[in-house]
Amino acid sequence: MEQADLAAAVHSVSLWALFMQAGLIVKLVMIGLMGASVWTWAIIIDKSMSFTKARRQFDQFEQVFWSGQSLEDLYRTLAERQNTGLAAIFVAAMREWKKSFERGARSPIGLQMRIDRAMDVTMSRESEHFEARLGSLATIGSAGPFIGLFGTVVGIMTSFQAIAGSKSTNLAVVAPGIAEALLATAIGLVAAIPAVMAYNKFMGDAGKLSARMEGFADEFSAILSRQIDEKLQPRQAAQ
Amino acid sequence: MKTSIGTSLVLHTVLMAWALVSLTPPAPLEVSQAESISVDLVPVDSITQTQQGEKSAPKAEKAAPKPTKKPNIVENAENAGDNDVDLKTPPTPVTKPLKTETAAAPKQNEQPVPNPSQENNEVKDIVPEETAPKPVETAALPTPRPEVTPPTPKPEPAPTPTPAEQPPAEIPLPTSVPLPAARPRPEPPKPQEAKPAEKPAEQKPDTATPAEKPSDKKIADKKQETAKSSASQKSDFNADEIASILNKQEAAGGGAKRSQAPAAAGDKKTIGVGLSASEVDAVKGQIQANWSMVSGLTGVQEVRVRIRVELDVSGNIVGQPEVTATGGPESTRRAVEGSTRRALMKSAPLKNLPVEKYEGEKGWNVLVLNFDPSEFAL
């Protein structure tokens, strides 16, 4: 039976025929790798879109922030929105500032610390959002070739068993089985190569964005600390 | 995220569809069909060591040519076959020449018959005259010259004397054929006066033809001879008939060496086969039987003897055999060499050596034996 299959397969070596004549394990491996490829590209598309969006938002916010507009006004406009990135950090810091300062904070150092904490938490949440799903890209990139190789090894094993059964070493008998097995590795590489490249690129982008957020947070913290000093000293002097 | 998954799926399906359509199986490799050359792997043994046998026959322990049918005629024949003469050429198949023979012979016979009969008559006229007794010739030669001229002017007088001599039987001849009868008649009577007198008496009752009487013997001889000669000369002068006669003999080559054993694989000729291990052992045994070793020699175990001896076909030693001992102490070596040489000389002529393995590079015309004296003489 195996022999007949191999004999029939000699003339059909198109991709679909190669896939259809593969064994169950090899088929599963190939389907899984195709799914991984779909997932990889979904992540790539999603990330590239979200990163460009985030970069644009950062630019816009920095422009607004450094335009000399009153921070109170900016806070008021942003507070109602669902904020991300720099705006979220700004809103978190301002919220903490407002809460502490309006109720009459006693210690400027405590206020400074709370504001920094709030900014840190927001920043880590934001950067977590940036790096979300990049881990699966890394997994696909590193494991994809191995999964494909596994499919290939299984396929070649079965095809060699078939050769042993047919008792013929003719290349026409050997070739289709090996081509079919190698298809698994090919799909694995197809899934893994973009995943690795995208992972490296997006990790770099995420690092740049978080650095930008950190820089903004430090600067904003400096501004707020100056504000705290300016506003608390008269109050303390008055007391 | 959902949108991006959707886009990714769409992209993949599009890509897969495109791949299925456009990535058709690659064009099969155009491998030029080189003509396969059949190669026979021939070990050197098949050239240096072959035994007479049949090439296509299955292998057997002893090679043998095709079994022959005829009794053995030629002594010491070398080439196997049914021939009466020991030829080196292999036997040729007989099927083809037979067909051409039967087809060609009858046609050619019809044409040549008229030609030789005309030519032969002229030739035969001379031949019997030469073979005929000399007195006839001497008598005949002078006659034609003077008589040729007279008979033509005298046709009528010639018949008259003859009827007088032979009146009863000559009645039909002159009437039917006057001219031819006239010529022979004058010729014989004049030169052979004695003979006609004898012949008519004898031949009158035998034959009714009187005109031929004088030359009856000649004519009769001529008739017989022409008959013979025409029969023989038909074939002699016709090239086609010669060919047909030659074809009647089967053009069969082959030697005259008969063989009874069933055909077994082998070559055309026995070139030379080395002695088998058992045959070598047999020779060694003959020598060892004559071996008398001095006992008590030191280091016999290390000594090895090599004998190189030239033999003739009957097993006699030709020239001086080379006996070389190696290993062991000098004195032991010398003693072993001497005893080996004595044993060899005693055992000559060596017996039970197969004659067919005498010739050749590996044959026993030069026999090389290696002995370990410690094995049998201590």
Image: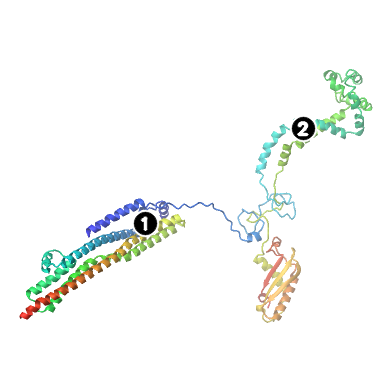
Q: Nearer the viewer, residue B356 or B10?
A: B10
As drawn, the residue found furthest toward the left would be: A239
Q: Nearer the viewer, residue B71 or B188?
A: B188
The label number, if any, that marks residue A22 in the structure image: 1
Discs 2 and 1 lie in a common subunit: no
| Residue A198 position (above or below residue B290) | above
| Residue B362 position (above or below residue A16) | below
In which quadrant of the rendered image does the C terminus of chain B lie? Answer: bottom right
Position of residue B66 measured from the top left corner of the image (x, y, whole percent): 66, 52
Position of residue B41 measured from the top left corner of the image (x, y, whole percent): 59, 58
For the question of whether residue A126 can be seen, the reply is: yes
Q: Residue B113: which quarter of the image?
A: top right
Identify the subunit bearing mark 2.
B
Residue A100 is left or right of residue A34, and the answer is: left
As drawn, the residue found furthest toward the right would be: B194
Count residues near mark 1 (Cα–Cα under 10 Å), then give few for <14, some for 14-19, many for 20+.
many
Position of residue A200 measured from the top left corner of the image (x, y, whole percent): 30, 66
Element carrying mark 2 = helix
Identify the subunit bearing mark 1.
A
In which quadrant of the rendered image does the N terminus of chain B lie? Answer: bottom left
Q: Residue at x 69, y 63 (%)?
A: B363
Amino acid type, callout 1: Ala
Q: Which residue is mark 2?
A: B116
As drawn, the residue found furthest toward the front would be: A68
Amino acid type, callout 2: Pro
Q: Residue at x 24, y 58 (%)?
A: B4
Position of residue B81 measured from the top left corner of the image (x, y, whole percent): 69, 51
Element carrying mark 1 = loop
